[in-house]
Amino acid sequence: MKTILSIALSILFAFPVFAQTIPSKEIQIQNALMAAPEEKRAGAMIYGYDAKGEWVVLRKGTNEMVCLADDPKSPGFNTSCYHSDLQPFMERGRRLKIEGKTVQQIFDIREAEAKSGKLKMPKSGATLFSLSAEAADYNTTSGEVKNTYLRYVVYIPWGTPETTGLPLKAYAPGMPWIMDPGTHRAHIMINPPRD
């Protein structure tokens, strides 16, 4: 006679967890593109997840924009798009995260590799667009997302307040400021005011 626990376990393993939580390829593409500038959407390359939860290319691109679908394992909704010049930096970060490196270790490894020239960084500014929403505002079945917030990050490796004129924090709503100055990850933060 089966116990309640053995029945529960057999049900759990009979139905993959991701089958219920990963949106369709079409919804992932549609939602990833929400973060991209409108004129870049048609040609953007898109990464997302297959039915097993594996990281895959959902669509090849024809322009310089790379978009990422929402990670179904992370709370809330977050998609982003960035210039292809950031791809080596982003891909290296993903690989190091898979290896189990901490946030600080990832920073230190990429910093050393960027300084040595092993990790190619953008020579001029390269932008990332990040779109987010609360979990309650995202319907994974229909793909509908409400109350989204779009912020902007412009990577300027090795930039400093002295070379850019930017402050180290925003002194007014939506004011650009520089984060991680003087490092490979130096970037301009632009957080528009929320309604």
Image (cartoon, rainbow, N blue to C red):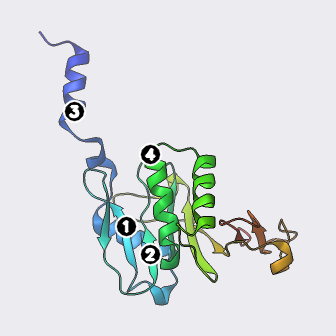
Residue 68 % position (x, y)? 44, 67
Estimate the spatial distance between the alpha carbons at disc 3 and disc 4, rounded to whole Å.
26 Å
- Indicate the quadrant where residue 55 lies: bottom left
| Kind of residue at badge 4 | Glu
| Kind of residue at badge 3 | Phe
Disc on res. 47: 1
Estimate the spatial distance between the alpha carbons at disc 2 and disc 1, rounded to whole Å.
8 Å
C-beta proximity under 8 Å, tags 2 and 1: yes
Say which residue label 4 marks: 99
Estimate the spatial distance between the alpha carbons at disc 3 and disc 2, rounded to whole Å.
35 Å
Q: SS of the residue at dot 1?
A: strand
Estimate the spatial distance between the alpha carbons at disc 1 and disc 3, rounded to whole Å.
27 Å
Q: SS of the residue at dot 3?
A: helix
Question: Tag 1 or tag 4, which sits nearer the N-term?
Answer: 1
In which quadrant is the C terminus drawn? bottom right
Q: SS of the residue at dot 4?
A: loop
Q: Residue at x 80, y 72 (%)?
A: 160
Say which residue label 2 marks: 66
